[in-house]
Each structure stands twice: as C-alpha cells, then as structure tokens.
Image: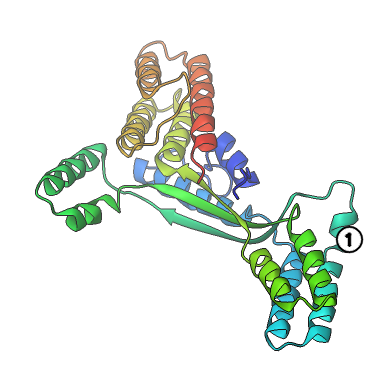
Amino acid sequence: MKKIILSTLTASLLFTGGLYANEKAAKDATVKEVNTIAVNNAKNDAKENQSKLVKEAIDSLKYAHEALVALEKKDSKEATSKLEKALGKLEVILSAKDAPQFLVIDNLVRVNEFVGTSKDVKFALKSVKKLLDEGKVQEARALLLPLKSEIDVTVVSLPLVSYPDALKLAAKYVHSNEIEKAKEVLGIALSTFTEVTQIIPIPLLKATDLIVAASEIAKEDKKRAIMYMSAASDSLDVAEALGYVSKSETTYKVLHEKINEIKKEIEGENKAEKLFDGLKEKLKEFKEKIFSENKK
C-alpha cells in the first residue's frame, strides 16, 4: 500500500529553492559557488525537515515483534502482555480527534548530484544505445546509473487504518489459543508499511537559485546577472536531458524564452523586475508539477 505524503521539505524547496535557507551567496559569487551553496542548503533543508519519528509507533512495533517471538516459543502469557503494551503505546494517538492516518517510523535522505552538462548526458545516452544494440546490457546499465541529479526523501510510515486492528485480532487469536493464526496476523502487521519517496531534481533548484541571485544584482552588475541567467538556462538543459518532465503548461522551451527575454532586458533599459517575477512564478508552477508527479 502506498500513500502520497508531501513533506514540509518539498514545500520549502519548492518555494524558496534553498538559496537563502542557510548560507547566502555573495553578490560577486561565481556560478559554481552559487550552485554549491544551493545544493548544500538543499541538503540541510532536507535533513532539518525530515518528518518527525513517532516514538510511540516505534515502541509499539518493538512490543509487537516481541509478542511474535513469544508466540514462537509458545508463551501465550508473554505474547498477550506484549500485545497489550503494543496497543497501549497507540492509545493516546488513537484517541485524539485529529489522529493521523500514518505514523512515521523511519526516513532517509539520499543525494545524487550529476555534475556534467546536458551534452554529457546526451553523449552518455548515445553510448547506452550503442551498447544495447551490441547486446552489452550490463555495460549500458552502468552508464545509465549516474544519470540522475536529485534529492530523494523516503518516508516509511505505519498505517493506523489497519495496524491496531491487526494487533487486536492477534490478541483475540492468542486468547482462543489459535497460535498459528495469531502469528500469521502479527507477521503481516509487522511487514505492512507505506513507503513513499519524494524526488526533488537538483538542476531545478540550481536554476531557481541562479535566477533569484541574478534578480538581486541585475541593476548593479549586468555582466554577472547575465552569467547567472545563462547558467540557469544550462541547468534547465541538464534537467530536461535527465528526463525530469513536468505536466505543467509551462515547458522547458517557455522557460528558456523567458530567460532570453530577461537577458535582453538587462542588456538594454534593464527594467526586468516584473519579468523576473513572471519567470519565478512559471518556474515555481513547473517545479510544483514535477514534485507532485515524481513520487514512487
């Protein structure tokens, strides 16, 4: 069973891009420095915003497991005691009016950053196709593995819809001396979790931060602002080449057109404030659709 869980992490990265969450890039920062800060801040955001683990849920699982061990030893009295403790750990949560459907018992943040360009991606894909044509599947697979640039946030939760009822049913079977049935029910309860992974493409975070940085210095440093915008366009190329697709009405082509429009305005009269705002809104909506679609 899988259930979509949007973490606070997604929201924070969606709207801010990560640039000003912790460290702020200097106004004379290089593109590499802006990108490094963007990724580091995104990592920190991911760690700081990990879903809070519910101690009662973890304790309940521990007691349920101990009940199963007791049943393996045919110790019904011990199993009953452990099941009562397992249910007891959930009493406060279950009695609350706004009791959650899922209790978080584990989470994990993985970061895989692709440091190449869109040309590197395209070259790798051509090589993969060639290897597949030659029947060299494992070599092709090895080339495909690095072709991702994302923060993956995995949340493992205990479903309150079914878990407590399973414990009660197991206790009922123990009471009626139907030990095998009790063991079967407990085994299922201890292996039924929801696991959802939220995928956040790093190139889109970089593009967002570079655009924000460019908007803040466009008046005082045209050359650097244009450099940031060009780098943002490159990041979008990487995201597209890596296959991070959005169902947004805004396309990569539209984003590139907006970036080019802003670059021309910066070089000219430099009244790009509204253009920047429009681009940020379109990129936010574009990312929002990608974030909502990229879950597994």
At 37% from the left and 15% from the top, the residue drawn is: 261
- Residue 4 falls left or right of residue 86: left
Rendered residue at 65%/70% (across/down)? 187
Comparing 252 with 160, the one in front is: 160
Q: Residues within 10 Å of mark 1 (few under 14, many from 20)?
A: few
State the image coordinates of residue 152 (x, y, percent, origin top left): 49, 51
**Residue at screen point 84% across, 75% down:** 176
Which of the pair 203/296 is nearer the observer? 296
Quarter of the image where one finds residue 257? top left
Amino acid type shown at disc 1: Val
Instruction: Classify residue 251 by image quadrant.
Output: top left
In the image, 141: left or right of 71? left
Question: On the image, numbered disc 1 is attached to which residue?
Answer: 92
- Camera-nearest residue between 73 and 203: 73
Callout 1: helix, strand or loop? helix
**In the displayed structure image, the side of residue 116 where residue 80 appears, left or right:** right
- 212, above or below 83, in the image: above
* Residue 193 spot, x, y in % from top left: 63, 58
The correct choice, above or below, for 124 with respect to 208 in the image is below
Q: Residue at x 63, y 52 (%)?
A: 49
| Residue 232 x/y as whole percent | 37, 32
Of 272 and 38, nearer the camera is 38
Is there any visible trace of residue 25 in the rendered image? no
| Residue 296, image x, y percentages | 50, 46
Q: Is residue 149 above or below residue 27?
A: below
